[in-house]
Image (cartoon, rainbow, N blue to C red):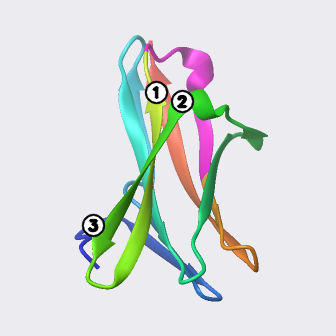
Amino acid sequence: MFFGFGLFFSGEGIDLVVLTSSFNMSVGAGDYLVCVGYSELGVNITWTLNNHVLTSDRVSENDIEEGNKVFRASFLRLCDAQVDDSGMYSCNISNGRTSIQGNISVCKFY
């Protein structure tokens, strides 16, 4: 894999890399949370904040080819961050048979 950092999770035929496990932001700032998944069956990625599904208008995805594998990268946009954006973000990845989850804790400062 081309990832030199991050947390790696693996399940039955599915891999997930979360590029950071904790994240601090100032109010009004913006950035992206990123996770990358792979399965021979293809993957579906969803994001949650404190167990509530986030809308897709904040998410963009790209396929990344490496050799004979295609990885799916999902980017969750955090813009104009507010204090209530703090919490546990989860990147949930499924291949239709199984799913795994990676968590990212986001803390905001006033």
Name the amino acid type tagged 1. Answer: Leu
Decide: few, some or many residues near mark 1? Use Cα within 10 Å; few <14, some 14-19, many ≥20. Answer: some
Q: Earlier in the sequence, mark 1 or mark 2?
A: 2
Which numbered tag is attached to residue 78? Answer: 1
Name the amino acid type tagged 2. Answer: Arg
Q: Earlier in the sequence, mark 3 or mark 1?
A: 3
Could you say whether the residue bearing mark 2 is in a helix, strand or loop? helix
The reply to whether dot 3 and dot 1 touch (C-beta < 8 Å) is no
Q: CA distance from mark 2 to mark 3?
A: 24 Å
Decide: few, some or many residues near mark 3? Use Cα within 10 Å; few <14, some 14-19, many ≥20. Answer: few
Q: Is residue 81 magenta?
A: yes
Could you say whether the residue bearing mark 3 is in a helix, strand or loop? loop
Q: Is residue 25 magenta?
A: no
Q: Which residue is mark 3?
A: 5
Query: Where residue 101 appears, x then y in whole percent?
Result: 63, 64
The quarter of the rendered structure image containing the C terminus is top left
The label nearer to you, 3 versus 1, is 1
Q: Residue at x 60, y 88 (%)?
A: 13
Quadrant in which residue 91 is drawn:
bottom right
Q: Which residue is mark 2?
A: 58
Q: Earlier in the sequence, mark 2 or mark 3?
A: 3
Could you say whether the residue bearing mark 1 is in a helix, strand or loop? strand
The quarter of the rendered structure image containing the N terminus is bottom left
Per the rendered image, the range of residues in magenta is: 80-90
Name the amino acid type tagged 3. Answer: Phe
Left-right relation of 47 to 72? right
The label nearer to you, 1 versus 2, is 2
Q: Residue at x 33, y 85 (%)?
A: 68
Decide: few, some or many residues near mark 2? Use Cα within 10 Å; few <14, some 14-19, many ≥20. Answer: few
